[in-house]
Amino acid sequence: MEKTSLPSSFCVTTLKPPYKAGSGSSTETSSSGSSASETSSGEDSSYLESGIDRLSPISCDINEKVRRTLRGPLATLKTDTTEPGDVDSEARFTDWDGESFVYEPNGSFVGSMFPDGRSEIGPEDSISMKDVCRRPYEAVSDDEYSNDGTVYLVLAADTARKPKYEDRLTRLGYVERLPDIEGKRHYRIELAIDKSLEEDKIRTGLMTIKLSNSKLAILNSDGLQPKLASDLENFNNGFLEVKKSPVSGYGAFAACDLEPYTPVLIEHELFNANSFDLYQKLDALTKEQMIAYHNLHGHKRSPSEDVRAAIWHTNRFSICKGGAVFLVGSRFNHACNNRNNVDYSYDQKKSCMAFVTNKKIPAGSELFIQYGSGPHHLFATWGFRCACGGCAGISEDDCKAMKSSPWGEEDSLAAW
Ligand SMILES: C[S@@+](CC[C@H](N)C(=O)[O-])C[C@H]1O[C@@H](n2cnc3c(N)ncnc32)[C@H](O)[C@@H]1O
């Protein structure tokens, strides 16, 4: 089944600097970058004066309050510097909406304090350098991952002048100045994301899932479960079980009562391929994987179509690089007219698909996703007559007409 294409990668929300040109900020300079308002250290004092970046010593009270609620690992900034003054003493950066980001003397991010007195600890706000740099920088790229897992982001300063943190962040190795674009300074910045925290996250266009909260492990991340099709009927991860379906063949069913937005399956792809490298990818599968692949349902679009290609066409999920196959994810049947109770989204970095409920679902109900736009589309593309119960289906006459289409099944879609 070729399902709707998914976003190529999770996106970092573009950080709009709430900074408005104020008294000190309107001094524009040439793109060479120096400004009349720069201090002798070369840092832009106007930001300090206008209170945009208030980095002030934190009081013991606040620190104690944050510490008391401290739980779990902290995201740590890289602080292997011996240069005095590079990292402020215990510090608090107050955001425009009153949220404060609290740092240890060594630069480790402790947590956030909210204006209403609540505090939140590290992990969720672990992109701490980005928070520090929220003003006067603006993110202009998605996160980029280097081979060693370090995360980078391209930031644009909202000004041609030298922003307050440039010297310090350059010294610490967090930022690298890039050529100016349209008179604005650009930087590549290393985001100090704790890798173990990242490993716990599945990031998709739909949502970010913390594996430790979801009580799910990534299926097939290092091997093959269920190993063979004979295991399939026993597949039950506590949220989803695979059983014979009254709609067609096998289907996925709720193993318990499910609330909306519950992840029910997170599965690593068996492989992903395009029409050019499909056979190469199939040849790379182990014998066991190949047996499991051959047990998937395959609809031949013509008698001469190769069965391996038919299985790929029937079960692939469109992702940016091609079509990915998931052994358990392929067992979801389709429901029309937004009656699907499960949505899915792909984490490109981890090559995983996450399937998440979109409504309350009682235990035992069949779980459906949406493959296409309606029964005619389904018949033309995948050759089956929809029995989801939520659509009018397709008449015998329409079936005959589509089958005899001179353009063949797939191309006959255009006629509908
Ligand atoms: C990806 S598989 C889904 C799992 C499949 N039922 C199995 O046994 O493996 C897609 C195939 O399931 C069947 N199918 C899925 N949704 C259906 C529906 N609403 N009505 C009828 N058949 C459906 C069709 O045969 C389709 O080609």
Image (spheres, grey):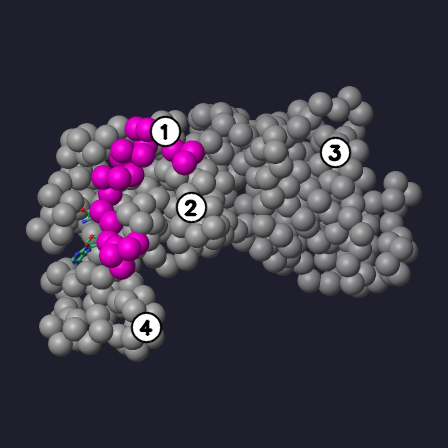
Sequence-wise, the earlier of marks 1 and 4 is 1
Give the residue at mark 1. 286
Residue shown at 64%/41% (left/top)? Answer: 152
Q: What residue range appears in magenta?
A: 283-305
Sequence-wise, the earlier of marks 4 and 2 is 2
Disc 1 residue type (three-letter): Thr
| Separation of residues labelled 1 and 4 (CA atoms) | 37 Å
| Left or right: 413 as drawn, with respect to 95 | left
Give the residue at mark 2. 278
Q: Secondary structure at mark 1?
A: loop
| Separation of residues labelled 1 and 2 (CA atoms) | 15 Å
Numbered tag placed on residue 407 in the rendering: 4
Residue 236: quadrant of the picture: top left
Sequence-wise, the earlier of marks 3 and 2 is 3
Q: Secondary structure at mark 4?
A: loop
Disc 2 residue type (three-letter): Leu
Residue shown at 71%/54% (left/top)? Answer: 156
Residue 282: quadrant of the picture: top left
